[in-house]
Image (cartoon, grey):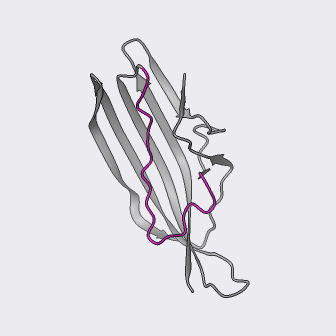
Amino acid sequence: MKNYTWVQLIDEDEIVAESAATRMVCEPKTQPVPYAGGGLDTNYPYDTKNPTRDSPPVELTGDATEISRKLAARIYLLWTSGKSNSIAVPLGYVAWRLSARAIRRGEKWELREGEVGLDGEGFHASGSYPEWDSLVPYSGVLTCH
């Protein structure tokens, strides 16, 4: 049986919340090393389904009137033959980016700008294993300062 393993690394995640009086930079509350790059996204493996998807949420609460986010990630695909004692072999990765800006109108949020896309040519064939130096265990809660 063939087995696919996805490993996602976060290279950048910048969230900015603005209100009438302040501009705050935010990071996920559980992120130990904000903006360090190369952080493992949530778990290893990220997923084992083929294909996989990601829809990174942002908490839209508090007195903020505008929130923007820039996210850059790389998702690696590894394959295992399924035979006993087999190991996962890296096939390559896709680098992707997300940027969005939402504003509050009364009690509702409106998406003003939003873009998701590939960073570069798409799938990059590679025999290199993903490496990370921190864990980014997203919980959905932000700390802003």
Task: Choose top left, top right, bottom left or bottom right for residue 35.
Answer: top right
Q: Estimate the x, y position of residue 43 in percent, counting from the top left.
A: 62, 56
Q: Image check: 23 left or right of 2? A: left
Q: Is residue 129 magenta?
A: no
Q: Residue at x 50, y 41 (%)?
A: 13
Task: Choose top left, top right, bottom left or bottom right for residue 126.
Answer: bottom right
Looking at the image, which is closer to me, 12 or 135? 135
Q: Image check: 90 left or right of 57? A: right
Q: Residue at x 40, y 59 (%)?
A: 120
Q: Image check: 41 left or right of 114? A: right
From the viewer's perspective, is residue 129 above or below residue 73? below
Q: What quarter of the picture does the C terminus occupy?
A: top right
Q: Is residue 43 magenta?
A: yes
Looking at the image, which is closer to me, 50 or 122? 50
Q: Which residues are magenta?
A: 42-62
From the viewer's perspective, is residue 90 above or below residue 132? below
